[in-house]
Amino acid sequence: MIWSFVKIVLFVAVVAGLTLGAGYLAETGSGVRIALANMEFTLGPVQMVIAVLVAILALWLLLKIVGLIVAALRFVNGDETALSRYFDRNRERRGFQALADGLMAIASGEGRVALSQAAKAEKYLGRPELTNLIAAQAAELAGDTKRATEVYKRLLADDRTRFVGVRGLMKQKLAEGDTETAMKLAEKAFSLKPKHQGVQDTLLQLQAEKGDWKGARNVLGAKLKQGLLPRDVFKRRDAVLALQEAKEVFSDDAPIEAREAAITANRLSPDLIPAAVLAARGYVQSGKPKYAARVLKKAWEAQPHPDLAAAFAAIAPDESPAARLKRFETLLSANPGHEEAKLLRAELQIGAEDFPAARRALGDLAETHPTSRSLTVMAAIARGEGADDAVVRGWLTRALTASRGPQWMCEKCHNVQSDWAPTCDNCGGFDTLAWREPPHSATPMPNGADMLPLIVGSAAEPAEDAALGLPTNTTGDEPEEAIILDEEVGQRS
């Protein structure tokens, strides 16, 4: 409000000053006389001032007209002028408006509208590095993969947009299931922008699927250097990749390289069970059983596992059951309260035919946590102690439908695998398998009912056999396979 008042005061002051000046000129009485040809003009002071102003305005208009004529002539000849710049600004304004409308259409999911606006923006702007990006995304949104591919290929010609073109083609090949070409494009994109996290993750997954463990380790190292991966996670995943390298070397019958790779994997992550097993195999092949036992014991302390026990048994495969039980004490003492340690001790006692000790080692595990393994062990103990065949059969019948216990399960999709692998067979997750018991895993053992006669090895009532789905034993003779359970337990230990 104050500023408005100030402007009014200034306007009144200017008008008053001009009025006073005109009155002063009128009072002087002098003027200007202009003679032109036979004509004479006499101008008063005020008229003279007006005439000068009109002359200045006329001169300005004349110069502008001359400049417009010159600009028009230059525009016709193709030279850049203010006139051409005006039209260019108008085209740019329309082009950027079309570009903005195209982006809005993409965000709204209107692929066809976005394609139309992208073509319009290209017409007005002539900036392919901008309009091709919109056109490619619009084509993908509209489902026109052929056109999107053409646009991405055009992006490859410009250094500024080459990465975008390669990445777009890579995503298309992944969607088509062409992982071979997608991996090559991912490698090219990684070479153009090694710090791009999305490309790193895609390339790492493709390399893991293809078994390119060396390349995957390079990508993993790049993620560590850029701070995109914690060091402890890097060590674990690098150990997984090193382990896969070691497995491939073993398959090629090159034990020296295999030992080195396996030991490297175990040092990177001592709690990685497959790495510990492979490292132990390498030490055994090199004649260093003490080192193998040390590796397995350290892994057992972190996570008891049947594969560790099998590898520990393989250190001295020809020892007697009593000697094996004594040697295993060093392993069992590392984690004595664990369920796996109880089961292992019970199996070793069965192998030594000390069935009361096996029962004591197992404790109440068959009741508190009944699994196929613990119930089978109880069946072996019952048979070794001379229990009735009905008792043994009862334990085995429960084992057929009991939980399988801990297995290799994907923590991402809960898929269960029989063997450990760096990636999940179901979801493709990298390093997602963990040794744990799946929920509701009451899965019958394959062909379990058919194995019962071989395991029990005794005559049963025909009615009981029919109820259990077993073939009846009409001869009444006890087959030699009656001791198969004890032998299997001893071999597993």
Image (cartoon, helix red, strand yellow):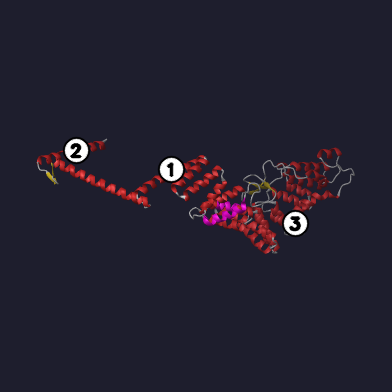
Q: Please name the residue shown 37% across and 52% down the image.
A: 77
Q: Mark 1 or 2, which is nearer the eye? A: 1
Q: Which mark is residue 324?
A: 3
Q: Quadrant of the N terminus?
A: top left
Q: Secondary structure at mark 2?
A: helix
Viewer-nearest residue: 376 or 350: 376
* Mark 2 in CB contact with mark 3 (< 8 angstroms): no
Locate residue 370 relative to residue 215 in the image: left or right.
right
> Label 2: which residue?
15
Say whether disc 2 or disc 3 marks the residue closer to the N-terminus.
2
Instruction: Kindly tell me whether residue 470 is visible in this rendering.
Output: yes
In the rendered structure, does residue 183 fall within the stretch colored magenta?
yes
| Residue range highlighted in magenta | 178-205
How far separated are the C-alphas under marks 2 and 3? 119 Å
Q: Quadrant of residue 310?
A: bottom right
CB under 8 Å between discs 1 and 2: no
* Residue type at the position of mark 1: Gln
Q: Earlier in the sequence, mark 1 or mark 2?
A: 2
Task: Tell me the tag on residue 97.
Answer: 1
Which residue of the protein is positioned furthest toward the front in this rendering? 38
